[in-house]
Each structure stands twice: as C-alpha cells, then as structure tokens.
Amino acid sequence: MKRWRLWLAVLMVVPLLAFTGCGGSGGGGDKGEVTIGGKDFTEQHLLTKITAVYLKEQGYDVDEAGSMGSTVARKALENGQVDLYWEYTGTALIVYHKKPAITDPDKAFDEVKKMDEEKDLAWLYQSGVNNTYTIMMRKDQAEKLNIQSISDLAKIVKKDPNRLTFATNAEFFSRDDGLKGLEKAYGFRFPANQVKKMDSGILYNALKEGQVDVSVGFATDGRIKAFNLVRLEDDKGFFPAYNASPVVRQEALKENPDLKELLVRLAERLDTDTMVELNYKVDVEHQDVTEVAREWLVSEGLVKE
C-alpha cells in the first residue's frame, strides 16, 4: 500500500514540474511564442541566431525559420508564417517597393518604415550595420598612397589613369548605381584596360594576392578583416544605405508587449565593424554560428555565460 502511494505521488509531481518549466530561463516559453525568419547567408544566419538565443533567454518559445531567399523571407513575414526577421533598408526600397535607392540612411529608414506601416509591418530600429557596396584596397598599399577615401582614390586615378587596376563583378560594372555612377559622382574614370571583371567570389582573393589594386566588395564581409583590407570612406555618400533592422508584424508586437524593447536593445548594439568581426569568425575561422552568437551576447551583457 505504501509503495502504491509513493508511485501515485511521483506521477502527480512530474507533470507539475514539467508545467512550471523547472529548466530555468533558457527558453521556458513563459512569455509567448515567436517565429524568427532569416535569409541564406552568413550574416543573416548570425542575426537570426543572435535574436533566437536572446529571446529564448528572455523566456520566449522560439522557432527558427532561416535559410530562405530574400523574397521568400519577405512573403513569409507578410503572410504571418514568421513574426520577424532582419531586413535591409535598400533591399526593401528597391526590391519590394520598387523605389529608387536612397543614400541617406535616416531617410531610407523613414521611407521604408512609412511604407510598411500600411502592411502592418514595423521597422523597429535602424542598426549601424550597413551592408552596402564598398571600395576596398590592401591596407599597406592604401597607406603607402595615402588613400583613405574614394575622393583620395579619384585624385590618383585622374593624375595617373593607368596606375591602378580595379576589380568588379558584372552587376556592379553595369549598374547605374555601380561603377559608372561612382565615377560620375567622384569625377574620375578607370580606363577600360584597367578594369578587370570577375565573379563576386574571387574579388577578395584577387585583391589580396595583388592581381588588382582596388576592388568593389560588401561592407560587412569577414574577408575584409581576414585579408587585411581597408574600406575606403564613401565621403560623398554615393552608395545606397543597406542598414539592417528587425522588422516585426504588428500583431506579434501586440501579443508580446516587451518584444520591441528587446529587439531594439539588440539592434542598437550592432554596427558594421561588429558584423565584420562576427562574419569573420564564421566564414574564416569556421566557428559555429550558435557559439559566435552566444559569445557576442555574453560580451554585451545581454545573456549570462
């Protein structure tokens, strides 16, 4: 009889422990359910994982739906299949709303925020992560020639057009907001024989190995750090703004009142240099995305070790 009563007590206690979430703060789900979307490249994997780990630590039950194409991720948000994901202002303007690119980051953010309010989507905070085009050089050569900005580069090209070679992918070469527009804005032009067209994947290596002197790239790519390259300052503000922001369905914000504050807390701590470092750890050092995400969150005091 005593043994029967003991087993009865155990059967009553176990479901109670499970219900009360005795596992602690690492994802008890007491604050609600959130589905986080993401695109299929390293930076997006990191942003998705950073957000997921952080929200789990805050008590949310989190589902991840990453590795989507850009337009797929957007549709998933509009259709309510995901509650939030990180999007870029330039992508929203040009791809989703078919508007001209805007170079001023604040104006770009205000424009997409206003347009997406009509779709019940909230752009919460413009982070300092600007994954736009950038013009790169090897650090030692840039220092030798005293080139810090694109204006500095333009002066040298105008003085001696055949001194430097430029690497570009086909898209940047042909776009009006690419090489042609850049040369027009800064008042210089690379001679045709000094421009080397190649696939995007080998631009960085070609620059690193000295096959070219200058190259286009993307501002948050981890290879900039790995190959000891420098980004030249776009001192005339030519390149469009591609600042990352958490974009959330309004319904999800209503259901989770503290979600906005938590996501803003993440966004305000991220900038281009930080993203270069995080991308570097994953792409170059081949560290695990989850470990890199958690390490950064711990370093920022957002989660405990």
Image (tube, rainbow, N blue to C red):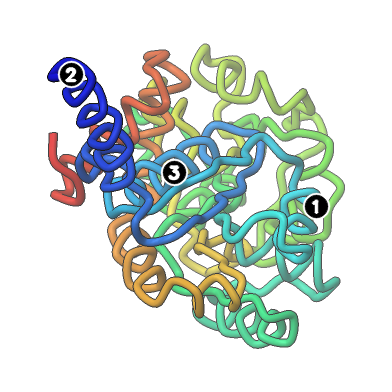
Q: Nearer the viewer, mark 1 or mark 2?
A: 2
Asked if disc 3 and disc 1 are in contact, CB closer than 8 Å, the reply is no
Q: Give the mark, 3 or 2, whose residue is nearer the N terminus.
A: 2
Q: Nearer the viewer, mark 3 or mark 1?
A: 1
Classify 10 Å Cα crowding around label 2: few (below 14), some (14-19), many (20 and above).
few
Nearer the observer, 152 or 108: 108
**Residue 15 percent coordinates (x, y):** 33, 37
User: Where, quadrant-wise, is the N terminus in this rendering?
Assistant: top left
Could you tell whether 231 is left or right of 75 in the image? left
**Residue at image x 46%, y 45%?**
47
Hey, what amino acid is under mark 2? Met
Asked if disc 1 and disc 2 are in contact, CB closer than 8 Å, the reply is no
**Disc on res. 1:** 2
Hey, what amino acid is under mark 1? Thr
The residue wearing badge 3 is 231
Hey, what amino acid is under mark 3? Arg
**Residue at image x 13%, y 41%?**
304
Classify 10 Å Cα crowding around label 3: few (below 14), some (14-19), many (20 and above).
many
**Disc on res. 71:** 1
Could you tell whether 200 is left or right of 27 in the image? right
Residue farthest toward the front in the current orientation of the protein = 1
User: Residue 268's quadrant in the figure?
Assistant: bottom left
Gap in Å between the C-alphas at discs 3 and 2?
78 Å
